[in-house]
Amino acid sequence: MRTVFAALGAFALTLATGQAGAQAVQVQVPSNVEPVRSQLTKAEVLADLHLYRAAGVYEYARTVHVFDVYTYAYKKRNATYLHLRQSPQYAQLVSELERNPRARVVANPVAASH
């Protein structure tokens, strides 16, 4: 038992010595930074969020243990999101959300055509 405590004590001393010898990195934090105002309307932000969720990116990010942008699963969902975001559906969704911000948006998966 003494050997275990001696080993733990030596390990703790090594850590403390290593940290004490490390040099601090100074970071200057400005106090006068103001947030940038978004150029997007609320309807545009909501439409973007709906497409992000419809593409499955939100669900993927919420459920994986390690978020990895290099996996096929993420790349597939992100490609779908980018496609939707650049499609005419985005503009249609924005228009609908401007008229009715509480509109219920439902994603309908479409089978791939070859």
Image: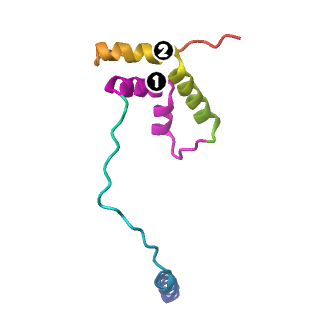
Give the mark nearest the N terminus, 2 or 1.
1
| Residue 5: numbered disc | none
Q: Is residue 59 above or below residue 43?
A: below
Q: Residue at x 61, y 34 (%)?
A: 75
Q: Tell me if label 2 and label 1 are in contact, CB under 8 Å.
A: yes
Kindly identify the residue that appears in the image at 59 percent across and 28 percent down.
Answer: 79
Determine which of the numbered discs, if any, sits on residue 51 in the image: 1
Horizontal and vertical percent position of residue 24: 45, 77
Crowding at dot 1, Cα within 10 Å, few <14 / some 14-19 / many 20+, comes out as many
Q: Which amino acid lies under the numbered mark 2 shown in the image of this protein? A: Gln
Residue 42 sits above or below residue 87 on the image: below
- Residue 69 in view (yes/no): yes
Q: Is the residue 59 above or below the residue 83 in the image?
A: below
Residue 89's place in the image compared with 3, above or below, is above
Q: How is the image coloured?
A: rainbow
Q: Position of residue 41 (x, y in %)?
A: 34, 27
**Could you say whether the residue bearing mark 1 is in a helix, strand or loop?**
helix
Q: Mark 2 or mark 1: which is in front? A: 2
Type of secondary structure dominating the magenta stretch? helix
Magenta highlight on residue 6: no
Q: Position of residue 65 (x, y in %)?
A: 51, 45
| Figure label count | 2
Quadrant where the C terminus is found in the figure: top right
Name the element at disc 2: helix
Is residue 48 found inside the magenta-colored segment of the image?
A: yes
Mark 2 residue crowding within 10 angstroms, few (<14) / some (14–19) / many (20+): some
Which residue in the structure is indicated by mark 2?
89
80 or 62: which is nearer to us? 80
Res 106 visible: no
Q: Which residues are magenta?
A: 41-69
